[in-house]
Image (cartoon, rainbow, N blue to C red):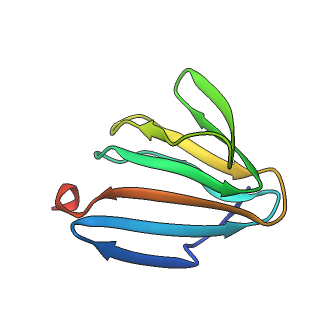
């Protein structure tokens, strides 16, 4: 999987929002961190893999919560995929 960096990132009222634009095979390789965060797909299709779960996300799918301490990865399976990660700025401190 090719790692992808956020296309846009901003903080709004204590929430950090990272917007990713990815093509098939791009994504966020397996990793873990101590804080929870939500992921939502806005365009295209991607697969989220985490402990005991593999799920396809599309624009019709609601957000999925990723628990802190669990490994997870996200991979675009369609060119032009847009997904967003949202987490609390306070949790990084």
Q: Nearer the viewer, residue 67 or 33?
A: 67
The residue shown at (22%, 69%) is 13
Quarter of the rendering containing residue 19: bottom right
View extreme (front): residue: 60
Q: Nearer the viewer, residue 74 or 31?
A: 74
Quarter of the rendering containing residue 1: bottom right
Residue 81 horizontal/vertical position (percent): 74, 61
Number of numbered markers: 0
Q: Is residue 30 above or below residue 26?
A: above
The residue shown at (29%, 46%) is 35
Q: Quadrant of the C terminus?
A: bottom left
Left or right of 46 in this view: 28: left
Left or right of 91 in this view: 69: right
Residue 45 horizontal/vertical position (percent): 76, 49
View extreme (top): residue: 52
The residue shown at (62%, 52%) is 41
Q: Nearer the viewer, residue 86 or 91?
A: 86
Residue 73 horizontal/vertical position (percent): 58, 45
Q: Is residue 17 above or below residue 52?
A: below
Residue 79 horizontal/vertical position (percent): 84, 63
């Amino acid at each position: 999987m090719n790692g992808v960096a956020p296309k846009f990132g901003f903080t709004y009222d204590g929430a950090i929002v990272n917007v990713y634009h990815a093509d098939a095979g791009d994504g966020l390789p397996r990793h873990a961190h101590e804080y929870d965060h939500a992921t939502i797909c806005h365009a295209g299709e991607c697969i989220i893999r985490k402990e005991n779960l593999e799920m396809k996300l599309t624009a019709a799918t609601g957000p999925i919560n990723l628990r802190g301490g669990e490994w997870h990865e996200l991979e675009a399976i369609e060119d032009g995929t847009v997904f967003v990660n949202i987490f609390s700025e306070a949790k990084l401190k």
